[in-house]
Image (cartoon, rainbow, N blue to C red):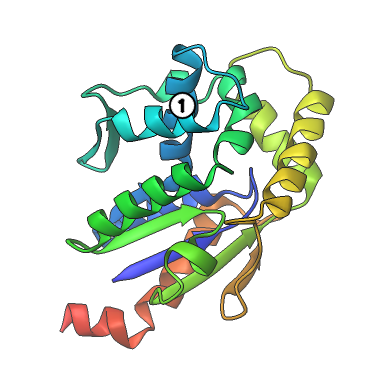
Amino acid sequence: MVVAIDGPAGAGKSSVAARCAAELGFVYLNSGAIYRAVTWKALQDGLQDGDAEQIAAAARSLDLQYRNGELMIDGQRRDDELHGAAVDQHVARHSAIEAVRAMVNRRLHQIAERQDVVVEGRDITTVVFPRADVKIYLDASVETRARRRWQQQEGDLSLQQISERIIARDEADRRKTSGSLQQAADAIYLDTSDLTIAEVCDRVIHTIQNTSEYQELQG
């Protein structure tokens, strides 16, 4: 079974998807983490944003595995590195490279073929898994999303700087020629601005558990 969750940066996708997957006993897949891994590798190799072919080659060279629901990069966890300011600044442009997107999508499908998953990103319901059993689109105001990122950060960016970056990221994601951010016509829309993570998860899990696909799994 595939549960697909889309939405802009800071809408709560990662927290909600991870928590729902844990409660349901599904595997949590974070497509954004894979794109961040590619950007981290590109920066480590000293590549510039315009070096599309080299970035794609770096992406293909990465050893990416999910172990117990955690992304391992060349056998190691890189959580702190993947959420650094440098990766934040470049990941939107790197994730727009067609060859990079093809690699990430291929990896996600390979994993989903073998197990039940909750996968989140920005084009999961529209491009990667257009036939997902459940489609959810999480959203929130820019102010709410910026405040969440500001509270989570370990750096010294101001709330205004984070807000500006989120607005720029939204624009970049929506303008992509491939895999742009948009709500699938059959996705359930949920504004999380005034909801806690627990409240959002309750609504998402209720939706999943009421599908025939989930009931068949339990039967």
Provide residue 79's location: percent of width, then percent of height: 40, 25
Provide residue 1's location: percent of width, then percent of height: 28, 71
Is 11 left, or right, of 26 in this rendering? Answer: right
Q: Is residue 213 above or below residue 53?
A: below
Provide residue 71's location: percent of width, then percent of height: 30, 35
Residue at 71%, 40% in the rendered image: 169
Location of mark 1 (residue): 54
Q: Is residue 144 above or below residue 112?
A: above
Q: Is residue 40 above or below residue 112?
A: above
Residue at 42%, 51% in the rendered image: 102
**Can the viewer see residue 203 in this picture?**
no
45 and 154: which is toward the camera: 45
Q: How many marks?
A: 1
Crowd around label 1: few <14 · some 14–19 · many ≥20 (10 Å): some
Residue at 59%, 19% in the rendered image: 48
Disc 1 on helix, strand or loop?
Answer: helix
178 and 51: which is toward the camera: 51
- Looking at the rendered structure, the kind of residue marked 1 is Gln
Provide residue 173's location: percent of width, then percent of height: 67, 48
Is 64 left, or right, of 32 in this rendering? Answer: left
For the C terminus, the image quarter is bottom left
